[in-house]
Image: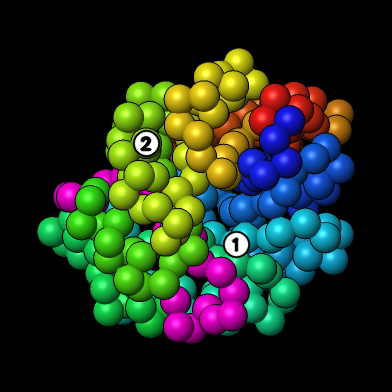
Amino acid sequence: MNKNVKLEICLDSAESAVIAQENGADRVELCDNLFQGGTTPSTGVLRVTRKNIEIGLQVIIRPRGGDFLYSHYEFEAMKEDIKISKEEGADGVVFGILSADGTIDVERNAELVSYAHPMNCTFHRAFDVVRDHSSALEKVIELGFNRILTSGQEATVLEGAPRIVELIRQAGNRITIMPGNGITPRNIERIIDLIGAREYHVAVDHARESGMSFRPGGVYMGGLLRPPEFLNTYTDPVQVQVIKNLM
């Protein structure tokens, strides 16, 4: 194990955050709605999470799923959520705003970075859909972000490894490039050997049967595409341990 390599776990509940802490994670990214890649968690979940973990706590600031071009009202909501995250004791926030042409929205991101101070800021995987990754990296650095979460503009980190290596070289010591998406216990060692990053972002959920014994059929809480009603997901403690021990 390399103690200089950090493990961040992406998750969506206070219980999962406790599991991550107990099994060696260095930091968590707290989200809601992982089905859409993560949206801002509720104040209640954030508060309970902060009360129960001592490791680093990052909060995603994303008012909805989909693209990263936000309306005036969505942008105002992001500012309020950053304020709440700061008040509740988060260590950092995770966000990213793009312009319609696929470039970094400098003005709005700058405002949020300033609003978040002194918390650290991660530019999330909005980076993976920018028009030009090299110029986007320079803009994110200029804006004062602390790290970039990226799959190298590919579906998974393994596919995007060459570009992630390129980004790490370009960034030098100016910002942390954190690979994330598709990292598992089976490929973490290969990914570390290929990329050599200092931090990795991992989601390791497992399904748990609901405790409900009464299960009426034909009534659903979601749309046509939905997860099972009586199957809940939590961070898998075994996978966290395995990945951390392989790092």
Q: Farthest top residue?
A: 186
Q: Quadrant of residue 54?
A: bottom right
The residue labelled by disc 1 is: 59
Mark 1 and mark 2 lie on one chain; the one further toward the N terminus is 1
Q: Quadrant of residue 48?
A: bottom right
Give the residues in magenta: 113-132
Q: Residues within 10 Å of mark 1 (few under 14, many from 20)?
A: many
User: Of 192 and 132, which appears nearest the observer?
Assistant: 192
CA gap between label 1 and label 2 equals 26 Å
Q: Do labels 1 and 2 touch, CB within 8 Å?
A: no
Give the camera-side residue of 6 and 56. Answer: 6
Say which residue label 2 marks: 165
Q: Which residue is pictured at 49% across the width and 46% down the height?
A: 178
- Left or right side of 207 for 194: left
Tell me where residue 239 sits by quadrant.
Answer: top right
Camera-nearest residue between 246 and 21: 246
Q: Residue 72 location, x and y as percent?
A: 31, 79
**Can residue 10 be seen from the camera position used here?**
yes
User: What residue is shown at x 13% (from left), y 59% (from top)?
Assistant: 101
Question: Magenta stretch containing residue 117, yes or no?
Answer: yes
Quadrant of the drawing holding the C terminus: top right
Residue projecting furthest to the left: 101
Q: Secondary structure at mark 1?
A: strand
Q: For the residue labelled by badge 2, is the local secondary structure a helix, a strand or a loop?
A: helix
Q: Is residue 177 one of those drawn in magenta?
A: no
In front: label 1 or label 2: 2
Mark 2 crowd level (few <14, some 14–19, many ≥20, 10 Å Cα): some
